[in-house]
């Protein structure tokens, strides 16, 4: 899950750096979870969805893809940083607050164009893909409080860094926070992958293949025969 850490730094001058650095209040941490409602796309052919399903984001590795849910991850963190410099050269960098946006954008549910809208088969494929969307939402809702607590706990004791080089002080803060966020998001991605794989079970695929009087199996057979398969 890739993202960006954005810093806004201001500077001040203090005669007594110990007093100045110790006077910063607790850091206010605010994290917004992003997961917009999906767009529905029914204009992509089955073979195009098949290629998308092999892109690495999805759990499907065998069989044919009649529908797909896709999304792009978002990690944005804004950190206003106050730099305090003393006459002796020692500086401290202090985070005033942390505002973050974590989640997904460009959420799309695809249903192969060979499956007509307003049919039982279309509705079944759409409902299956919405299971993936709801799993994504559930994982995000579970992990936003986790990353918030981890950031708040770290900043409680490490929200101020004292260094001779103010730029290095900011870099130390940035790198540690990035590490906390990225490690938590990696945990979230693993959890999400396991939930998605559970949805794409052999039992679920067998069920979809047999519903709607076999409509989806018939559609798949027609597409394969038309393409010499």
Image (cartoon, rainbow, N blue to C red):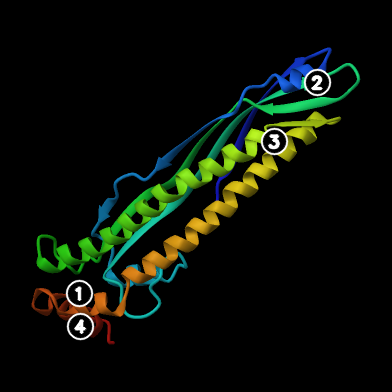
Q: Quickly name the residue at label 3.
A: 158
Question: What's the CA distance linking mark 4 and mark 3?
Answer: 61 Å
Of all residues, the one furthest to the right in this rendering is 88
Q: Quickly name the residue at label 2.
A: 18
Q: Is residue 80 above or below residue 13?
A: below
Closer to the chain start, of discs 4 and 3, is: 3
Q: Residue at x 55, y 46 (%)?
A: 3
Question: What's the CA distance linking mark 3 and mark 2?
Answer: 15 Å
Q: Residue at x 38, y 70 (%)?
A: 197
Q: Quickly name the residue at label 4.
A: 221
Assign the C terminus to one quadrant of the image. Answer: bottom left
Q: Nearer the viewer, residue 167 or 164?
A: 164
The spot of residue 25 in percent (x, y) is: 63, 22
Q: Are marks 3 and 2 in contact (CB under 8 Å)?
A: no
Closer to the chain start, of discs 3 and 1, is: 3
| Residue 200 visible | yes
Closer to the chain start, of discs 1 and 2, is: 2
The spot of residue 89 in percent (x, y) is: 89, 23
Q: Which mark is residue 25?
A: none
Q: Which mark is residue 208?
A: 1
Identify the secondary structure beneath mark 1.
helix
């Amino acid at each position: 899950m890739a993202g960006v850490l954005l810093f806004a730094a201001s500077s001040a001058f203090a005669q007594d750096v110990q007093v100045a650095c110790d006077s910063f209040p607790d850091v206010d941490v605010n994290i917004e979870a992003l997961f917009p409602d999906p767009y529905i796309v029914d204009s992509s052919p089955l073979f195009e969805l098949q290629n998308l399903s092999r892109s690495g984001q999805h759990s499907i590795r065998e069989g044919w893809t009649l529908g797909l849910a896709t999304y792009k991850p978002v990690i944005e963190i804004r950190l206003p940083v106050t730099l305090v410099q003393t006459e002796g050269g020692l500086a401290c960098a202090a985070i005033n607050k942390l505002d973050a946006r974590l989640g997904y954008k460009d959420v799309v549910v695809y249903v192969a164009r060979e499956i007509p809208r307003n049919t039982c088969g279309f509705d079944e494929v759409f409902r299956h893909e919405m299971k993936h969307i709801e799993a994504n939402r559930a994982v995000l809702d579970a992990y936003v409080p986790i990353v918030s607590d981890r950031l708040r706990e770290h900043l409680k004791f490490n929200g101020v860094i004292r260094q001779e080089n103010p730029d290095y002080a900011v870099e130390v803060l940035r790198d540690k926070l990035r590490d906390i966020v990225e490690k938590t998001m990696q945990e979230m991605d693993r959890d999400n992958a396991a939930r998605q794989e559970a949805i794409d079970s052999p039992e679920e695929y067998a069920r979809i293949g047999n519903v709607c009087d076999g409509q989806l199996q018939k559609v798949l057979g027609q597409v394969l025969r038309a393409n010499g398969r």
